[in-house]
Amino acid sequence: MVELQNIFLEHGQEYRQNHMLTYVQSKAMSAIEKCRSSALGGHMEVCEDCGCYQISYNSCRNRHCPKCQTLMKERWIENQKSNLLNTGYFHVVFTIPYTLNTVVYQNQKGVYSLLFKAVAETLSELALDKKYLGAKIGFTSVLHTWGQNLMHHPHIHCIVPGGGLNSLGRWVNSRKKFFLPVKVLSRKFRGKFLFYLKQTKLEFHGSQEYLKDDTSFQSLLSSLYQKEWVVYCKKPFKNASCVVEYLGRYTHRVAISNNRILSIDNDNVTFKWRDYKDSSKWKTMTVSAEEFIRRFLIHILPDGFMKIRHYGLLGNRNKTTRLKLCKQLTNTPVLFKEKASTLQLLQKITGRDFTKCPHCGSDKLSRFACFGKSPPETA
């Protein structure tokens, strides 16, 4: 199986020599190259009954590594289940026009932050309007920066409960088939994002016409007011139990998973992608290894930048008190369940009990540190 790690190991050094990388890009590349190898150390488990041993190397735990996200995703899902309410949920997606991609990439931290801000205020203010819902809502937002072809495509996924608390502290349900009118969401979001973008101090580098001076850029922003922006609201979930599982697919997803990479051949990488403009058909795309690495590195987020954020009723301030009230008003059963251990989560993911020997089934396993050392020779 071809993995992102293989591509970096084969072509990463040459890419570094020919391109200037940021600190976080260099750090991510290095971590992915070393992930689950002797370079990061590990441990050895020996079965006291049959003598079988196996070495497990440590993960890099970098949030952009496709091999390190599954366990983190499962743990996040476990933690979020206690926030679920007995109500319908909506999936809303906010996207900015592609003409802004260059500016966004050159000012990632600032523009991604105001993207979160514009989305949060759009949802909160419209929901609070009595014409639509007249209640305070809570929701989770997740930033994605890629499209299926790995090109730059910043957008935010939001999972929103179908209701909220009104000024009297009562629960108000939204309409069952849609949360808020999409056109209203789109235009409010457009106005807020462009307003905040005009206030933001931006850096401009590049040959595009609209980057040459501030007048040209302001002219571009004015033209964007005339276009319809893409906001999509998917059908509501059938029940709350599948919401977090569904959201987990988005929260810890990286730009491309290893199972989408098909081959490396003659310095070219072939991967599969879903073409949403053509009835969501699966297709294959072949690009040079250099171009593949360039596209992947576009999506390395600034150091410390939070790509998952909670707002409104799910915000940190008084969250426990508000959630308790919302659960009472929505007849949500309160479940007291111990958090799953790492071994339990691994068993859920792989179907294997890591406390037992994989060869004889014994639970008499001894663990030894094994930092980059060769395993002992068998008799």
Image (cartoon, grey):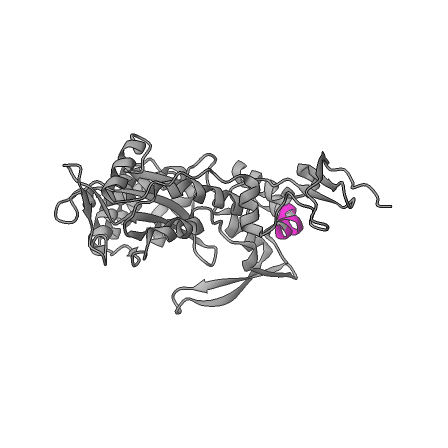
Q: Which residues are magenta?
A: 6-13
- The x, y position of residue 277, in whole percent, is 38, 66
- The x, y position of residue 272, in whole percent, is 52, 63
Residue 300 in view of the camera: no
Relative to 125, 154 lies left or right: right
- The x, y position of residue 262, in whole percent, is 59, 62
Relative to 176, 342 lies left or right: right
The residue at 66%/62% (across/down) is 266
Q: Main secondary structure of the magenta part?
A: helix
The residue at 35%/53% (across/down) is 99
Relative to 1, 142 lies left or right: left
**Does residue 232 belong to the magenta stretch?**
no
Q: Nearer the viewer, residue 377 or 118?
A: 377
Count of residue discs: 0
Q: Nearer the viewer, residue 267 or 134?
A: 134
Compared to residue 273, the image places residue 102 above or below, namely above
Q: Quadrant of residue 309?
A: top left
The N terminus sits in image quarter: bottom right
Q: Nearer the viewer, residue 338 or 34?
A: 338
Outermost residue toward the right?
379
- The x, y position of residue 264, in whole percent, is 63, 60
Residue 281 in view of the camera: yes
The residue at 59%/55% (across/down) is 289
